[in-house]
Image (cartoon, coloured by chain):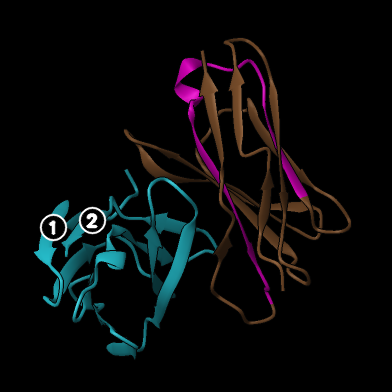
Amino acid sequence: KAGVTQTPRYLIKTRGQQVTLSCSPISGHRSVSWYQQTPGQGLQFLFEYFSETQRNKGNFPGRFSGRQFSNSRSEMNVSTLELGDSALYLCASRNTGGEETQYFGPGTRLLVL
Amino acid sequence: SQQGEEDPQALSIQEGENATMNCSYKTSINNLQWYRQNSGRGLVHLILIRSNEREKHSGRLRVTLDTSKKSSSLLITASRAADTASYFCATDNTDKLIFGTGTRLQVFP
């Protein structure tokens, strides 16, 4: 099976802009989670989607949002970008039929100038 | 912060030596997982240990879990230069992973 894919891999934006990141899970996986990794805060959970519904949410402001499509692909959006949003954004998928392991994609590195 | 703590923060060893990393966490868990990350890339899943297990092996990896102390350790035996990476523990209690701060391992040839 193909692994989790994320696009784009690298992105440069300026403050105030918005950005959309995309994640395609492993075929058959219905749960998609998003994580942010920064040198200061480490790896932090953003949200999880399952069957097009947000099932879990971390402690991030409302500028961070996401959605999941019927084919389980997911997008996350960050509006009104701030310098502190510069980070590696990681997507993970999981087969919720008893599977506990989350499989991560290569990440999207976002730089906000 | 919800994050767990890992120690040491950094570890340098020679090839062939064993590497031990420790992880402490704060809440009750369903399972604890270890991941490896090379140079800011994606996370690679190494091993999962459930809350009712005390020890688990996978190849050169050995993981222990002590739920009474809320701690886990990862042992990599006979390390190789290719093991150079950052290692993270992650606890799973409500379908989301809470990561530790990570241990940066450097294995010298």
* Chain assigned brown: A
Secondary structure category for the residue under label 1: strand
What crowding class fits label 1: few (fewer than 14 Cα within 10 Å), some (14-19), or many (20 or more)? Answer: some
Chain letter for mark 1: B
Q: How many marks?
A: 2
Residue placed under numbered mark 2 in the picture: B103
In the image, residue A102 lies at what x, y percent?
56, 66
Q: Are marks 2 and 1 in contact (CB under 8 Å)?
A: yes
How much space separates mark 2 and mark 1, taking CA atoms?
7 Å
Q: Residue furthest right?
A: A70
Dot 1 amino acid type:
Leu
Stretch in magenta: A74-96
Which residue does the image show at 27% across and 60% down from the upper left? B84
Q: Nearer the viewer, residue A36 or B67?
A: A36
Q: Colour of chain B?
A: cyan
- What is the x, y in percent for residue B86? 30, 55
Q: Which mark is residue B11?
A: 1
Quarter in which the N terminus of chain B is drawn: top left
The residue marked by circle 2 belongs to what chain? Answer: B
Residue B8 makes an appearance in the image: no
Looking at the picture, which amino acid does disc 2 mark? Thr
In the rendered image, the vertical position of residue B23 relative to residue A62, given as above or below: below
Q: Name the image quarter holding residue B50.
A: bottom left
- Tell me what residue is drawn at x 63 percent, y 15 percent: A80
> Are the residues under marks 2 and 1 on the same chain?
yes
Where does the image place residue A53, in percent across and percent down from the top left? 77, 53
Q: Compare residues A90 and B82 and report the one nearer the observer.
A: B82
Marking on residue A10 = none
Would residue A103 appear left or right of B43 to someone viewing this image?
right
Q: Is A40 placed above or below A69 here?
A: above
Which of the two marks, 2 or 1, is nearer to us in this view? 1
